[in-house]
Amino acid sequence: MADQLYLSLWYPNFRLAALPQAMTGVLRQFATIAKDGQVNSPLGRVAAASSFPIDWTEAPVYQRIYVNDDRSETTEDSIIENAVAEATEQLHEDSAYEFEMYWNLWVPEATDEPSGAALDTLWRLEPVRTRIIGFGPEFDSGSYEQNGQIRVDFGLDTPWTFETEDELDEDAARYIQQNVEKLLAFTLSVEKHCGISSRLLWTESGEALAEKLIAKLQRLN
């Protein structure tokens, strides 16, 4: 069953004033992995930014959606440093600051064959949304203690943990391996470059995901 996948990050002696710089650092690492060597890729830009007061039941007090394609007159505002500076211009202890970015992942899509006799799984390389959220210490009753000062929401874990009753064919195994390697590359890059004190890759159900991913790679290799 598909599960929500998260990466929680904690920082030593963290203060609210340090949140914009910390957010910028994590977004940069994500952009590096997402662009995959493509210098001018829109995947390296912020797609949307929001600020939420008090808890998740409240409507955002700030929200901006960026256009990062040929329709846009300028993409300067969606550069990571500029988007973070604008969204966090007014820092509040009881607010959360959310930034959306995309990276390309292989995504399974079950489709009926024309004959209707079987169910086939097709894999497509598609932009997948990731939300990176920085928490003020008083947001949602101090939920940062559980979620981290910064939490990365990857969405459903299907691209990394796809399971089937049948043995994976060679193409599917390769796609999953590429997804897992990209996830691990981002996680290790954050650990190396962002000055965190601890991190946790976890799912909403509480399943031990790190071990599952390692086991998946071992099986695929």
Image (spheres, rainbow, N blue to C red):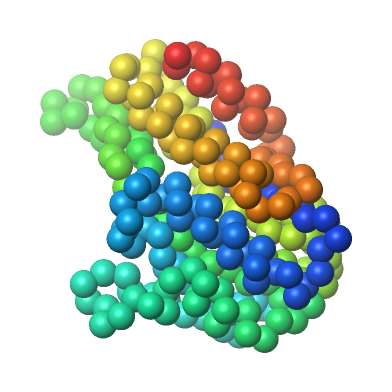
- Residue shown at 22% from the left, 76% from the top: 71
Q: Nearer the viewer, residue 197 or 102?
A: 197
Depth check: give the residue in front, 105 or 83.
83
What residue appears at the point 50 percent right and 75 percent down from the top-left corner? 83
In the figure, 35 relative to 172: above or below? below
Q: Is residue 177 left or right of residue 215?
A: left
Instruction: Look at 29% across and 23% down and name the residue there.
Output: 171
Residue 63, image x, y percentages: 52, 80
User: As displayed, is residue 14 above or below residue 201?
Assistant: below
- Where, by quadrant of the figure, is residue 203 drawn? top right
Q: Position of residue 53 (x, y in %)?
A: 70, 79
The quarter of the image holding the C terminus is top left
Which residue ends up furthest to the left in the rendered image? 114
In the displayed structure image, the side of residue 155 where residue 20 appears, left or right: right
Could you tell whether 182 is left or right of 127 in the image? Answer: right
Task: Check the image and report above or below for 126 versus 64.
Answer: above
- The correct choice, above or below, for 139 with respect to 182 in the image is below
Looking at the picture, how far across and down is residue 98, in whole percent? 58, 68
Camera-side residue of 97 and 54: 97
Kindly tell me whether residue 59 is visible in this rendering: no
Q: How many numbered circles does the render carry?
A: 0
Q: Which residue: 58% across, 19% down?
A: 215
Query: Which quadrant of the rendered structure holds the N terminus?
Result: top right
Q: Position of residue 106 (x, y in %)?
A: 35, 38
Kindly indicate the quadrant of the structure image that contains residue 20. Answer: bottom right
Horizontal arrangement in the rendering, residue 106 relative to residue 202 (left or right): left
* Residue 103 seen in render: yes
**Residue 72, picture quadrant:** bottom left
